[in-house]
Amino acid sequence: MSFEFRWNIYADQPHNVALRKERLRHHLKYAGSYFGLLASNIHRAVPVLSLYRQYRKKMFREQVRIDGPFALSISPAKERSEEVLECLKETGIRKSLVRIPSWEVDKLDVFEKFFSLLSENGIELTIALLQNRDDVLNPARWQHFLEDVFSRFGRNVSFFEIGHAWNRTKWGVWDYREYLKLARPAVSLAEKYGVKLVGPAVIDFEFHLYPAVLNAVPFEKVSSLLYVDRVGAPENKQFGWDASRKLALLKAVIDGSSRLERDLWITEVNWPLKGTGKYSPASGKPNVSEEEQANYLVRYYILCLASGFVERIYWWQLVAPGYGLIDNRKKEWRKRPGFYALKFMVTLIEESTFTGKVAHPQAMIFSFRRNTEDFSVCWTGSGECDYSFSRRIIRVLNRDGEEIPFHDTHIKIDQSPKYVFLA
């Protein structure tokens, strides 16, 4: 198949240049691998679903210590990388992820300068290694790329994520066996250079791809690009599954796929923004307002972290016109509502303990304790409702940390998360 690779510099992703009819024809060509995956998943279905039921029963019912889950993806910026660093530091987050595309191997000097800046400021770094079709067709090219990156950055980088969103054909991989041809060489090279691997970086709700890959590649951490933007709010359902149910299922698939116990990282998530035109990575329904993005960001993090199934979540990304927390289209960068929402959430939720969820027909009410303070994070999926706490309210802060008025035990809950501190 002729699959010209063209990079969309505005949305930070490849153009989908293959016609739908041509993609369908080649999916049919790879039908054998799909049937192999089906057989593999049917074999594991009973133990995985049994684990899923166990995880669903305990989800939101057990205490969860929130220790270092907040992370941000960033990119070097021409003559403004120090500004990127300062904005990252302002959020209070000290874990970062930077993409290195295989086709930018000639720019490793630029990345090295940026990485040195991060290291000097105590920022932990994970590198995501991006592939295209040429890497699949020319394995030596990909292996040379891996060796270049591992040998150059291995001493100062915590983890390397192998491959990216390979279950989307625009990223150049046509089935899981082709992905394994990219991932397996990384294992021996990782041993050679003493680096740790993350993967398989599957995007969206396609969990059937994990068992075959996880049994073939001993990743240190299991990663997922768990987007839910296609259904809007994180509480909305896709085929009956909302974000928290997807997490429970994914964790069950991971734990039921192999004998290795591995932590789960979400290495990419965001909601694209309305009105950003060519800078948006999606069209139509997934695009939301800046206020909605900020609300969904907080709600997604709380749902995921309170589940106890996710060790770390990277928001993609800090600076980007079409989806980032900062709009850099003008000389004066503008911090969006999501920036302030994330910054304030980090100050409260980091090093706290999730203690339970209140059962309510409309509102989501999650309880936390930090040091000696008890507080709840609450919102509705739609509309608003009144709620009376059983304890006296001391203060109420909005999503961005501003004080708002309240009654003695009573507040109005809406779609924007609130932090309610209790006596």
Image (cartoon, grey):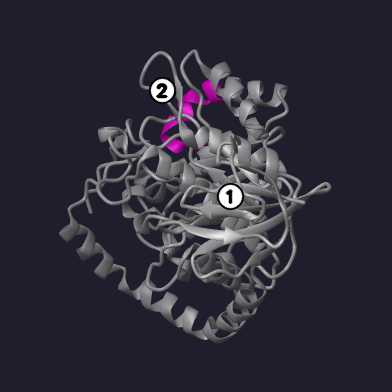
For mark 1, give the secondary structure.
helix
Q: Which residue is at a point 48% across and 24% down the rendered structure image? A: 107
**Numbered tag placed on residue 186 in the rendering:** 1
In the image shown, does 102 or 387 lie closer to the viewer?
Answer: 387
The amino acid type, in three-letter code, at marker 2 is Asn
Label 1, residues with CA under 10 Å away: few <14, some 14-19, many ≥20? many
| Span highlighted in magenta in the image | 99-112
Q: Which residue is at a point 66% across and 60% down the rendered structure image? A: 389
In the image shown, does 216 or 20 lie closer to the viewer?
Answer: 20
> Which residue is farthest right?
372
For mark 2, give the secondary structure.
loop
Label 2, residues with CA under 10 Å away: few <14, some 14-19, many ≥20? some
Which comes sooner in the sequence, label 2 or label 1? 1
What secondary structure characterizes most of the magenta part?
Answer: helix
x, y percent for residue 1 = 23, 54
Asked if residue 312 lies left or right of residue 2, the reply is right
* Camera sees residue 9: yes
* Camera sees residue 268: no
Disc 2 from disc 1: Cα separation = 35 Å
What residue did someone put label 2 on? Answer: 328
Question: Which image quarter: residue 96?
Answer: top right
Q: Which residue is at a point 24% across and 63% down the rendered structure image? A: 26
In magenta stretch: residue 260: no
Total numbered badges shown on the rendered structure = 2
Q: Which residue is at a point 41% across and 23% down the rendered structure image? A: 328
The relative height of residue 51 versus residue 384 in the rendered view (above or below) is below
The amino acid type, in three-letter code, at marker 1 is Ala
The relative height of residue 14 versus residue 63 in the rendered view (above or below) is above
The relative height of residue 41 versus residue 198 in the rendered view (above or below) is below
In the image shown, does 27 or 386 lie closer to the viewer?
Answer: 386
